[in-house]
Amino acid sequence: MVTLKSQREIDLMRRAGEIAAEVLQIGGAEVRPGVTTKHINDVMHKFIKSKNAKASFLGYGGFPAVACISVNDEVIHGIPSGRLLTDGDIVSIDVGVLLNGYHSDNAATFPCGTVSPEAQKLIDVTRQSFYEGLKFVRPGYRLGDVGYAISSYAHQHGFSVVRDYIGHGVGTQLHEDPDVPNYGVRGKGLRLQKGMVIAIEPMINAGGFQVQQIHPNGWTVVTKDGSLSAHYENTVAVTDDEPLILTSQS
Ligand code: MG
């Protein structure tokens, strides 16, 4: 069931979202050759605690860390570890924050040192595909319009869209209805209404769209063909007019 949020609830989610946005940038700033993904996670954890907030992902379904940190062909759910980042890696960080009973969720992919032009293009197209979808996040459009805009932009640039993992509603629960696919048919799907809050999170692959979950840690999803994958996400509220990105820094 899709719950519509009041203005008061959206204001609370925005406060969680500001912390989520800030901690994502703090994590991203730690991405450099020679650093472990656990170090990035620990810096982020310290910041969230300093804001008297909680990390939404820690313990969620048994997830053992504050952030998902996914490197290169890892699509999502990378577990921070002693893995050392090296020059040319691309590093997706996904982090959610719980404050005053409401979650906000965001993600981005960061280049480590100097990355290939293809990797940088993948990062840029993934980010822009979110903004292409965002153009349709307003009353009068449907989720199919949002997903179509995301996938057609990615396809225009020669990339593919992950289908097995999608965005979601956000609120008192980290994952709520509705499902928010990064693909769709124009004019189809749930009609957008003021008060809906959704996480739109394109996961875009440089190669084929297929993914697999074969990692021994039981979490991490990788591209089936070993190609690079990038991720970009914000939590967004539907208003009467322009959508409101709740995970933006104040
Ligand atoms: Mg999410």
Image (cartoon, helix red, strand yellow):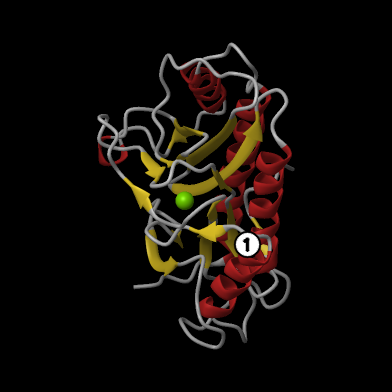
Please tell me in which quadrant of the rendered image residue 16 appears: top right
Q: Please tell me whether residue 166 is drawn above or below residue 211 in the rendered image.
A: below
Tag 1: residue type? Ala
Where does residue 153 sit, x and y in percent of width and height? 66, 66
| Residue 9 visible in the displayed image | no
Asked whether, in this view, residue 124 is left or right of residue 67, the answer is: right
Q: Nearer the viewer, residue 146 or 206?
A: 206
Please tell me in which quadrant of the rendered image residue 157 appears: bottom right
Q: Please tell me whether residue 21 is drawn above or below residue 198 in the rendered image.
A: above
Where does residue 10 sit, x and y in percent of width and height? 57, 59
Image quadrant in which the N terminus is located: bottom left
Q: Residue at x 47, y 55 (%)?
A: 208
Q: Residue at x 54, y 36 (%)?
A: 93
Q: Is mark 1 within 8 Å of ligand 1?
A: no
Q: Residue at x 26, y 41 (%)?
A: 61
Residue lying farthest to the top in this orientation: 34
Please rate how many residues cluster around mark 1, counting C-alpha atoms within 10 Å: few if below 14, some from 14 to 19, many from 20: many
Q: Residue at x 65, y 75 (%)?
A: 136
Asked whether, in this view, residue 231 is left or right of residue 171, the answer is: right
Asked whether, in this view, residue 70 is left or right of residue 131, the answer is: left
Image quadrant in which the C terminus is located: top right
| Residue 247 visible in the displayed image | yes
Where does residue 40 sit, x and y in percent of width and height? 54, 21
Q: Nearer the viewer, residue 187 or 178?
A: 187
Disc 1 is placed on an element classified as: helix
* Residue to which mark 1 is pinned: 154
